[in-house]
Amino acid sequence: MVDELVSLPIIVVSGSRDIQEMLRQAASAPSVPIETLEAGNAAAAARSLSGGADLVFVDGDLSSEEIAQVVAAACQAAKPPFTVLLAKPDTGAVPFKTDALATKPAQLEEARRLMEAAAADPRARGRRFVDDALHRPQDACSDTLST
């Protein structure tokens, strides 16, 4: 096991350049360096996932088909990343199997708090740097869907 995290590679999947930019700016807030890649759709996310990531933020405003494709690509990755669906607080979440659900940030300060929480969460931090047996996703990529 490695004691120190070099960086936290993340992918922000959103069709909104504003959301991508806000989360990229927020990534400078945590004490852990965050390497941010942006993907505007599922195809771009799949390409980005081939390079590896520990964490994927998926914008709930994407179409259901796009979200399903991103989640499937994450599950098929060599080391599946921790996936977080970002949903608007007034609409709730769409029913996709991700590791976590978070309120979609509307302001930079909210995005910074989200990045701080993500950087501190061992489920996201350890995907490539910690023993897989300790932090492997429990249910996000399993074939069984709890309803």
Image (cartoon, helix red, strand yellow):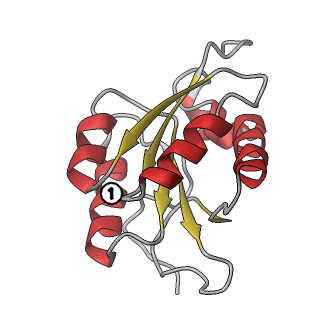
* Residue in the image at 32% along x and 26% along y: 51
Foreground of the two, 50 or 2? 50
- Quadrant of the image containing the N terminus: top right
**Residue 66 visible in the current orientation:** yes
Measured from the top left, where is residue 112 in percent x and y?
74, 43
Q: Residues within 10 Å of mark 1 (few under 14, many from 20)?
A: many
Measured from the top left, where is residue 36 in percent x and y?
50, 31
* Residue in the image at 74% along x and 41% along y: 121
Foreground of the two, 73 or 78? 73
Foreground of the two, 15 or 142? 15
Instruction: Write down the quadrant of residue 28 in the picture.
Output: top right
- Tell me the element at label 1: helix
Instruction: Write down the quadrant of residue 42 in the picture.
Output: bottom left
Is 127 drawn above or below residue 144 in the view shown? above
Foreground of the two, 26 or 47? 26
Residue position marked by numbered label 1 in the rendering: 70
* Residue in the image at 61% along x and 75% along y: 88
Q: How many numbered marks, from 0 up?
A: 1
* Residue in the image at 79% along x and 47% along y: 113
**Residue 136 visible in the current orientation:** no
Measured from the top left, where is residue 12 in percent x and y?
46, 46
Measured from the top left, where is residue 116 in percent x and y?
77, 39
Answer with left or right where residue 96 lies relative to residue 135: left
Is 48 drawn above or below residue 31 in the view shown? below
Amino acid type of the residue tagged 1 in the rendering:
Val
